[in-house]
Image (cartoon, rainbow, N blue to C red):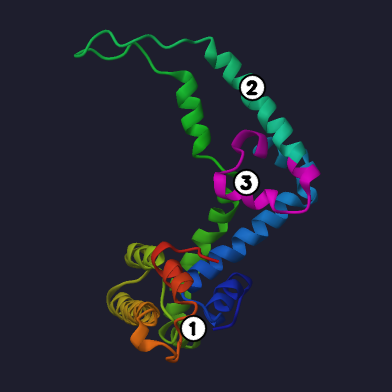
Amino acid sequence: MKEQLYTIPVNDAFDTDCECPVCAMYKQLEDNAIDFTMGPSYMEDDNRAVTDEKGFCYKHIRMLYEQKNRLGLALMLDTHSQKIIRDLKGLSNQKPSSSAGLFKKAGGTNSVSDYVDALEGKCFVCDRIEDSFSRYIGTIFALWKKDTAFRAKLTSSKGFCVYHYGMLYKEAPKNLKDNELSEFLTAVDKVFFDGMTRVNGDIEWFIDLNDYRNQGADPKNSRDAIPRMINKTNHFMQ
């Protein structure tokens, strides 16, 4: 299959020696989104309007803080916080009423808490990632159908984390049919369970090495077993 632009990052991820190529895809998108956010784009009015509206989740605000452009982050936080102050001042004038009784509904919604709840679910970086990530997932199935070289990459991979294994199972029936679907899920099952069993064996050997009877034994692949199993079970461990 002739490689097109959108297949390049997917193939690159499956070429990576990692415990979950889908995590690798996401991580690359995340790094790109962080770089974009902290680049010259933060001075553009249309981007600033979006960051003012959405803000950032806890994970990504920490990643942004670790970047060198503290002035850029301060400018985004300045206008974002000003918007929050304006919005919440207006909403705080709409005081909620108390519950009328145990068996009666409250007398209206709490506008302040609704606003805060909605804000907690927004993140400029997350949204920028997800826009491309969903297309990357679709590309996996397109490549599986048409590219024998990609099939070989998937079947020889180290498997997937639990989260992305479930995601592939969920999305596969939407993109594949009949024999293609069956073959894909069979391949995914094999690499997933082989990978989980392999890393679990490394974890068990790491534990056994703490037994005095194994003092001086070959650590084999146990040295990094903990972060690799975290990647398998919790995903996005980098």
Q: Please tell me whether residue 113 is drawn above or below residue 210 in the rendered image.
A: above
Instruction: Report the residue at 67% width, 32% height from top.
Output: 80
Is 156 in front, or is 81? 81
Label 2, residues with CA under 10 Å away: few <14, some 14-19, many ≥20: few
Q: Mark 2 points at which residue?
A: 85
Q: How far apart are marks 1 and 3 (CA)?
A: 35 Å
Q: Circle 1 sits on which residue?
A: 150
Horizontal and vertical percent position of residue 183: 31, 81
User: Real-space Cα distance between discs 2 and 3?
Assistant: 19 Å
Residue of label 3: 61
Left-right relation of 206 to 71: left
Q: What stretch is highlighted in magenta?
A: 51-73
Q: Where is residue 36 in the image (x, y as percent from the top left)?
A: 71, 54
Instruction: Look at the numbered disc 3 and give the secondary structure of its residue.
Output: helix
The amino acid at mark 3 is Ile
* Residue under the point 36% across and 77% down: 207
- Mark 1 vs mark 3: which is more N-terminal? 3
